[in-house]
Image: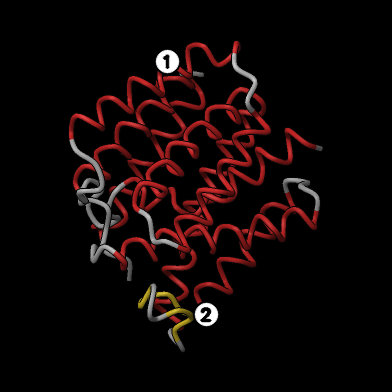
Amino acid sequence: MVSNNRIIPGLIILASTIFFYVSNLDLLFINSLLVLALYDLKFSRFISLLNSFLLFVLLNVYFYFEYLINFENIFVIIFLSLLILSLVFKNKLSFIFLIILFFIFSYKLLLIDREFFFILIAISFLNDTSAYLAGKNLGGPKIVPFISPNKTWSGTSVSFLITLITLILLKVNIYFSVILAISFFLGDIYFSYFKRLYKINDFSNLLYGHGGILDRLDSIFFASFLFYSFKIFI
């Protein structure tokens, strides 16, 4: 049985997402997610309060002047470079800048294809919930216990299949659907890796029973990059 600690915050998140989708308040939506993410980074001591404020201002300057900036290719190169640096050198600063790029990609996707971006958000909740329920009820061996001790093969397999089927039903290319479904798992693992590296369980306790907003958005971290790249280069 699922605890109310997870159900109630989950319903609030879902209702908020639907509200922003229906109301077309995209800039307010992305800023709401940004503020919550910066709170997570401050709470988990990745950045200071001052740096949180400066990053918020700088990103909003970018959002405002986005139509004047055409750095798509450079953003992709920077993302891949920072990803390598963060893994090879376990660099906290690289991880922080990757999160900033994640919000840049997210905002660009809202402008390019807002419906699919909201679909990604919804699928991320579906992916997390199905993994949690399947893992809790089916149990079985752990998939990467040294990084994410609660993640099981059963939960990962079920969430992968549900995500894949959902994407295919939405008429996403089957090969791209497989890649996206895999990326949901990899995003979760990548964020879990940094949490274990810096000895934190969740980025914050903001969403009671769910951790912080970054604990919920981690699964679309790579998915947003892949979809952004797909839209830019294909």
Above or below residue 207? Residue 39 is: above
Drawn side of residue 174 relative to residue 150, left or right:
right
Q: In the drawing, what numbered circle is on residue 210?
A: none
Q: In the drawing, what numbered circle is on residue 61?
A: 1
- State the residue in front, 213 or 164: 213
Label 1 is placed on what type of residue? Val
Q: Are marks 1 and 2 in contact (CB under 8 Å)?
A: no
Quarter of the image containing the C terminus? top right
Quarter of the image containing the N terminus? bottom left
Residue 48 x/y as whole percent: 19, 38
Q: Residue at x 47, y 19 (%)?
A: 62
Residue 175 x/y as whole percent: 79, 57
Which residue bears the numbered disc 2?
154
Q: Residue at x 55, y 66 (%)?
A: 159
Colour convention: secondary structure
How much space separates mark 1 and mark 2, taking CA atoms? 44 Å
Q: Residue at x 59, y 49 (%)?
A: 80
The mark nearer the N terminus, 1 or 2, is 1
Counting other residues with Cα less than 10 Å from the Cα at mark 2, is it few (<14), some (14-19), or many (20 or more)? many
Q: Residue at x 39, y 81 (%)?
A: 145
Counting other residues with Cα less than 10 Å from the Cα at mark 1, is it few (<14), some (14-19), or many (20 or more)? few
Label 2 is placed on what type of residue? Ser
Q: In which quarter of the view is residue 160 placed?
A: bottom right
Drawn side of residue 151 relative to residue 78, left or right:
left
Dot 2 lies on which element? helix
Disc 1 or disc 2, which is closer to the eye?
1
